[in-house]
Amino acid sequence: MFSNQLLLLYFVPVCAMLVFLLTAFLRDETTPNNDRTSWMVVAIGALLWPITLPSVVSRRISRRRNRSKGDASFWTLSWFYIPFVGR
């Protein structure tokens, strides 16, 4: 039972990160969708979510800070929704 909870604890964020990376990849018009290297990067990024998720969140936060200094409404958003906010 404990091992099932550990698997769930790992694979739920994997699925969330995969959805996020797939959305970003499919929106990107500079990379063709049939490029195998890009698909491997998406898969590896999802599997290594403990490294990629904090990196993505910190990059989004720093980008938003530089863009919207003094915008208090941005900081009322939950940390979970920051990667999903449009550019």
Image (cartoon, rainbow, N blue to C red):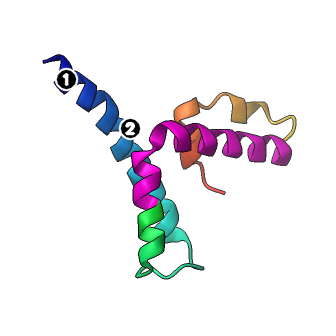
Q: Is residue 70 left or right of residue 32?
A: right
Q: Is residue 72 above or below residue 51?
A: above
Which label lies toward us, 1 or 2?
1
State the extent of the magenta-drawn residues as a range.
Answer: 42-68
The image shows residue 14 at horizontal and vertical percentages of 36, 43
Residue at the image point whose x is 66% and y is 27% from the top: 76
Is residue 41 in view from this perspective? yes
Residue at the image point whose x is 70% and y is 30% from the top: 75
Q: Which residue is mark 1?
A: 3
* Mark 1: amino acid: Ser
Is residue 22 in view from this perspective? no
Dot 2, crowdedness within 10 Å: few (<14), some or many (≥20)? some
Residue 50 part of the magenta-drawn span = yes
Mark 2: which secondary structure? helix
Q: Is residue 87 left or right of residue 84?
A: right
Residue at the image point whose x is 52% and y is 62% from the top: 24
Q: Is residue 85 above or below residue 35?
A: above
| Label ID, residue 14 | none
Count of numbered circles on the image: 2
In the displayed orientation, state which residue is furthest to the top. 2
Q: Nearer the viewer, residue 76 or 66?
A: 66
The image shows residue 50 at horizontal and vertical percentages of 49, 36
Q: Is residue 54 left or right of residue 71?
A: left
| Label ID, residue 13 | 2
Q: Nearer the viewer, residue 68 or 56?
A: 56
The image shows residue 42 at horizontal and vertical percentages of 45, 60
Q: Nearer the viewer, residue 85 or 18?
A: 18
Dot 1, crowdedness within 10 Å: few (<14), some or many (≥20)? few
Residue 28 part of the magenta-drawn span = no
Q: Is residue 28 left or right of residue 17?
A: right
* Mark 2: amino acid: Pro
The image shows residue 4 at horizontal and vertical percentages of 17, 26
